[in-house]
Image (tube, rainbow, N blue to C red):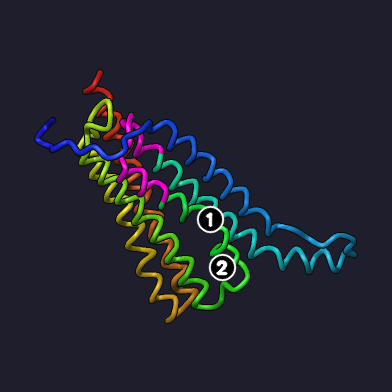
Amino acid sequence: MNGHQRVRDDEGSAARLLALSDGVFAIAMTLLALDLTLPAGLDPEGFEHALGDVMPNLWAYALSFLVIAAFWRGHHQIFRYVREVDGTVIRLGLLSLGLIALMPFPTTLLAEYGELPQAVALYSGAVAAMGATQLMLTFVVWKRPWLGSAAVPDPVARNDVADLASTVLVFAVAVPLAFVSPMGAKLWWAVLIPVKSFTGKRGKRLRAAAQRLGA
């Protein structure tokens, strides 16, 4: 068993967990758009004013959609080699989905009260919690190769861990930073852009190399 001790606890099909996951991700993405509304019957001046008022909601929607989409993509990458799931994977998966389903709430707070430190801190904490849960799930799947048809290649797993750890670190730091400067905390999130670009490109190279070796 490649030096690992096999542990069985309520094993089941990974396909069922992925099907549930896709549904939760889709619903969470859809709920994000519910705040994007304008009152009916506005005159031109009122329409322009209402459109300006809804822009923070649109910005928060776009941000959270990208965040959830990134976690959805990462979730599928985690289960790329997995065929079965055990109790630990199921519990972590459900915890991750619970946090994803909660995202419309901090998104609304960010849209409506984005200048307040509590709203920015809560949003940052929610993303950090999602990242931490997915990080634990990645590590568990990596260290339990018997759950899949093939073991996750170590270089790929290490890159995925580093990618998720950077997300957790940046958003966790933003929580206390929000109480110093809410705008500064939101600007701090942008640190992830070059980091994600680097880990994403490296991940593609490592996965391509693993496929060539497995061919």
Left or right: 31 as drawn, with respect to 206: right
Q: CA distance from mark 1 to mark 2?
A: 10 Å
- Quadrant in which the C terminus appears: top left
Q: Earlier in the sequence, mark 1 or mark 2?
A: 1
Asked whether 85 falls inside the magenta stretch, the response is yes
* Residue beneath the point at 44% across and 33% down: 16
Looking at the rendered structure, the secondary structure element under dot 2 is: helix
Q: Where 110 sits versus 17, above or below?
A: below
The kind of residue on which mark 1 rests is: Ser
* Image-quadrant location for residue 178: bottom left
- Quadrant in which the N terminus appears: top left
The magenta segment is 76-94
Q: Position of residue 164 (x, y in %)?
A: 33, 52
Of the pair 207 and 193, the residue shown nearer to us = 207
The kind of residue on which mark 2 rests is: Leu
Q: Where 41 sits versus 122, above or below?
A: above
Q: Where 124 sits versus 146, above or below?
A: below
Q: Position of residue 204 (x, y in %)?
A: 33, 36
Q: Position of residue 128 (x, y in %)?
A: 39, 61
How crowded is the residue under tag 1: few (<14 C-alpha within 10 Å), some, or many (20+)? many
Looking at the rendered structure, the secondary structure element under dot 1 is: helix
The residue to which callout 2 is attached is 110
* Residue beneath the point at 38% across and 33% down: 14
User: Do the CB atoms of the residues marked 1 and 2 lie less than 8 Å apart?
Assistant: yes
* Residue beneath the point at 90% across and 61% down: 41
Q: Which mark is residue 64?
A: 1
Of the pair 201 and 147, the residue shown nearer to us = 147
* Image-quadrant location for residue 142: top left
